Amino acid sequence: MLGALSICWQIVQPDVARAARKRRYHIQEMIREGRERANRQPRRSTSKSRTTRKPGREKVNPRLWSQLITLVQGDTAVAARLIRYEQNRNPDRSRDWCAEKAIWQLQRDRH
């Protein structure tokens, strides 16, 4: 019986080793992706007051902001995230253009 188990282990052992290497690779890949994602996210300031605005941080036209807030049912975090998403995809465009694009996409997706 012990001899049969030994033979089975000799047959299966390379597959087990290969699976372990793959698992290790995938874990390392997930760790690397997590670090990259963490490095891409902007650091938030702990200070409550800001004396200067960063370039590209201009406010959105109040009419557009109001329309976007209405479309996302009052969720300001979602509205800001949609504008930020469009800014990342179109860095050369203004915040107003990005707000208009987010509004257009929301309306398009609902009809």
Image: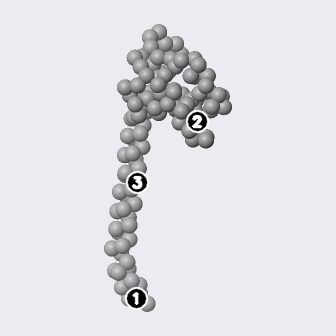
For residue 67, what is the image quadrant?
top right
Residue assigned mark 1: 4
Q: Name the residue: 38% across, 67% down.
A: 19
User: What crowding class fits label 1: few (fewer than 14 Cα within 10 Å), some (14-19), or many (20 or more)?
Assistant: few
Taking depth in this image into account, of 60 and 104 the one nearest to the observer is 104
Residue assigned mark 3: 27
Q: Is residue 78 visible?
A: yes
Q: Amino acid at mark 3?
A: Ile
Q: CA distance from mark 1 to mark 2?
A: 67 Å
Q: Is residue 108 left or right of residue 5?
A: right
1 or 2: tag closer to the N-terminus: 1
Q: Is residue 6 visible?
A: no
Q: Position of residue 9 (x, y in %)?
A: 38, 80
1 or 3: tag closer to the N-terminus: 1
Q: Are marks 1 and 2 in contact (CB under 8 Å)?
A: no
Q: CA distance from mark 1 to mark 3?
A: 34 Å
Q: Position of residue 1 (x, y in %)?
A: 43, 90
Taking depth in this image into account, of 50 and 19 the one nearest to the observer is 50
Q: Name the residue: 37% across, 26% down.
A: 92
